[in-house]
């Protein structure tokens, strides 16, 4: 009986730990939309072209259903889900930059020879994704 209770407690702890990061991301996103008086559908249907004026001038959006990145034309990441990156590190001997986020994800950014940016991400929970230019 004690073993079953212990196993149940361990499983509940593991489950709670895996749900919390995703909830934190969605909660931050929800608050951002609320501040901007938008809904998720407004955000999806919005204009994703690079603005020509203001603080986001010249930035391009790369996103999937979890992460949204704002990067300049040289693939330098400026914002991740509205926040500045926690840190960046060039992978020695390559043209790949690893960008750490405040949410615990790492974004790998490669500037291709044609000038386009290739972005993928991973996190400690084993989740990953490909960020597409919007």
Image: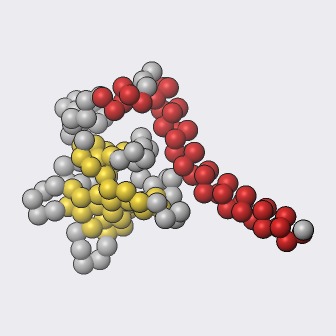
In the rendered image, is residue 71 in sight? no
The N terminus sits in image quarter: bottom right
Which residue is at a point 13% across and 56% down the rendered structure image?
Answer: 115
As drawn, 51 above or below 128: above
> Looking at the picture, how far across and down is residue 40, in whole percent?
42, 30
> Looking at the picture, how far across and down is residue 99, in whole percent?
38, 60
Q: Which residue is most to the right?
A: 1
> Looking at the picture, how far across and down is residue 67, in whole percent?
40, 48
Which residue is at a point 52% across and 32% down the rendered structure image?
Answer: 31
The C terminus sits in image quarter: top left
> Looking at the picture, how far across and down is residue 24, in whole percent?
57, 45
74 sits left or right of 17 in the view = left
Residue 51 position by quadrant: top left
From the viewer's side, name the closer residue of 10 and 49: 10
Q: How many marks?
A: 0
Which residue is at a point 27% across and 49% down the rendered structure image?
Answer: 132
Q: Which residue is most to the top?
A: 37
Which residue is at a point 72% across and 60% down the rendered structure image?
Answer: 13
Q: How is the image coloured?
A: secondary structure
In the rendered image, is residue 18 in sight? yes
């Amino acid at each position: 009986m004690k073993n079953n209770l212990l196993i149940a407690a361990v499983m509940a702890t593991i489950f709670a730990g895996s749900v919390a990061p995703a909830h934190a991301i969605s909660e931050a996103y929800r608050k951002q939309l609320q501040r901007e008086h938008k809904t998720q559908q407004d955000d999806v249907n919005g204009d994703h072209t690079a603005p020509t004026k203001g603080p986001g001038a010249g930035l391009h959006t790369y996103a999937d259903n979890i992460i949204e990145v704002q990067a300049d034309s040289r693939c330098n990441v400026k914002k991740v889900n509205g926040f500045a990156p926690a840190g960046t590190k060039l992978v020695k001997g390559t043209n790949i930059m690893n960008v750490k986020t405040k949410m615990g994800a790492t974004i790998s950014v490669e500037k291709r020879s044609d000038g386009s940016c290739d972005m993928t991400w991973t996190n400690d929970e084993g989740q990953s994704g490909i960020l597409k230019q919007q």
